Structures are given as structure tokens and as C-alpha cells.
DNA sequence: TACTCAAATCGAATTTTGTCAATGTGAAAC
DNA sequence: GTTTCACATTGACAAAATTCGATTTGAGTA
């Protein structure tokens, strides 16, 4: 079962879309409610909701409901997890050389 | 021009696929030639080639041609760039509070 | 020259994502 | 109760990504 790789792929799916990158940049300024993001992004409400769901489920954005509004903000823990994954991949598992089939 | 966000999205496109995550894990052990990756991944040659192109063009994998073989390895610089992007997004641009439209 | 082999590219089918209007949901206000 | 408002969800469609066999490219070898 390669659930590990599926999970990693899901985390980075949050970052691989241009619009989601724009949304994340907007959230750098601090918490914002969906209505503001809709206006600043120039997106229809359903489209923004679609992207926010992906961001929240990936763990990189937090959604806080307050009355009838939902406020979104960057989830630093999610970013730390993503960074940890990248660091792990970039650090060698053990010291091996070349492949044994076509190198001598 | 939002080329910045398009570039960021392209970088993380390398990481948002389950098979590419598996390929990256295989490369943690060190440089490997395509023929080995094909065998270990159980993919047809054209499919592996497709994924390797995405990984190389994103800058997270290096391809080294030697005779008729191509050897691939992790490109640490590419990972550092990705990590730098994540760090930048996760660090607040300025100290703002809530949105001005529905918070008081 | 021709032959071989590894990898890239093509082409067509399938799968997955993204978009957006319409509808549903749930909480607050009346 | 009803209405209103913000957001989620649905469904149909368009666009992009992925798969994989077939073909091409390009370097090494005879």
C-alpha cells in the first residue's frame, strides 16, 4: 500500500495551481473571509469554494467559521509538514553509488 | 502579469503526482538510470519518460546522459527553491488583522 | 554503410481537474 | 414561523493531465 505517496501528492496538489498560489499570497496579509477572497480573486463563489476546500483538506489553510462568515488563514503547521517532506526526499537515505545494471 | 504564480505552480506540479513521489523516493538512494526506474516502477518506457521530463523541467531532478543511458538524480537546488517558496508564503507579509469588510 | 539499443516523441484514448450556473444547507435576523 | 445571507454542493461541460502502444531520434557498434 503506497498511501504515503498518495498523501504527499495530495499535500502538494494544494500548491500546483496558479489560482491557489494567488489565494495563498492573499492570505499572507493575514486572515480573510471568503467574501473578500471572491472579490480580490475575481472568481465566482463556487469556484473559490472549490479551491478553498482543496487548500483546507491539504492542511495548508485553516477555515474558521464565525456566524455566517468563514475566515481563512495560512496554517503554518501544514507548510512545515510540506517542507519536512521535501527535506526528507532531498536527504539521501543511504550512501549508494550508481545503479548496478549499467554502471561499472 | 502573474508569471510568478504560474512558475510556483509549475514547480509544485512535480510533487503533486503519486507516481512522481515514488520516483523521487527511488532516487533518494542515489543516481539511477532510466532502465532501472522503469523496472522498479513497473511503468512502460514512454510513461516513465513523461514523468522524468516533468521532474527535470521543474528543476527537482537532474538528468545526466552517458553513452546511450540517462542517469537521474535528485537536484538539491530545486528542492531548496521549493522550500524557499513555501517559507516565503508561510511568513506574513506585514502585520495585518482581520478583513475590513466583515470584522470589527 | 547498416544495425542495435535507450530514450524521446507522437497520437489517440482515458482520467482527472477546473469552471460556473443552479441548487441546497445552515445559521442569524426578523 | 419566514426571510436573508454566506457558503457548500451538485451537475454538466471544458480543459488539462496521464497512460500506453507505435514511431522516431540519436548515439554507439560492427
Image (cartoon, coloured by chain):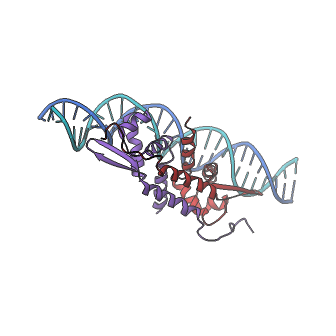
Chain colours: A purple, B red, C cyan, D blue
Can you see residue A99? Answer: yes
Q: Is residue C27 above or below residue D14?
A: below
Closer to the camera, B80 or B67? B80
Q: Position of residue B92 (x, y in %)?
A: 46, 49
Residue lying farthest front? B95
Q: Position of residue A95 (x, y in %)?
A: 64, 71
The residue lying at 39 percent from left, 51 percent from top is A57
The quarter of the picture where the C terminus of chain B appears is top left
- The number of numbered badges drawn on the structure is 0
In the image, B8: left or right of A75? right
The front one of A13 and D11 is A13
Residue B16 shows in this picture: no
Q: Is residue A85 depicted above or below C16 in this figure?
A: below
Q: Is residue B26 left or right of residue B68?
A: left
Quarter holding the N terminus of chain B is top right
Q: How far from the left and from the top, in percent, is residue D4?
A: 23, 30
- Which sits in the foreground, A95 or B21? A95
The percent coordinates of residue A2 (x first, y second) are 48, 61
Q: Residue at x 47, y 55 (%)?
A: A79
Amino acid at each position: 500500500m503506497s498511501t504515503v505517496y498518495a498523501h504527499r501528492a495530495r499535500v502538494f496538489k494544494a500548491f500546483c495551481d496558479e489560482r491557489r498560489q494567488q489565494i495563498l499570497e492573499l492570505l499572507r496579509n493575514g486572515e480573510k473571509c471568503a467574501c473578500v477572497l471572491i472579490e480580490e480573486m475575481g472568481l465566482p463563489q463556487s469556484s473559490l469554494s472549490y479551491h478553498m476546500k482543496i487548500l483546507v483538506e491539504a492542511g495548508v489553510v485553516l477555515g474558521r467559521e464565525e456566524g455566517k462568515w468563514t475566515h481563512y488563514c495560512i496554517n503554518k503547521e501544514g507548510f512545515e509538514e510540506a517542507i519536512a517532506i521535501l527535506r526528507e526526499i532531498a536527504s539521501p537515505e543511504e550512501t549508494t553509488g550508481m545503479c548496478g545494471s549499467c554502471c561499472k
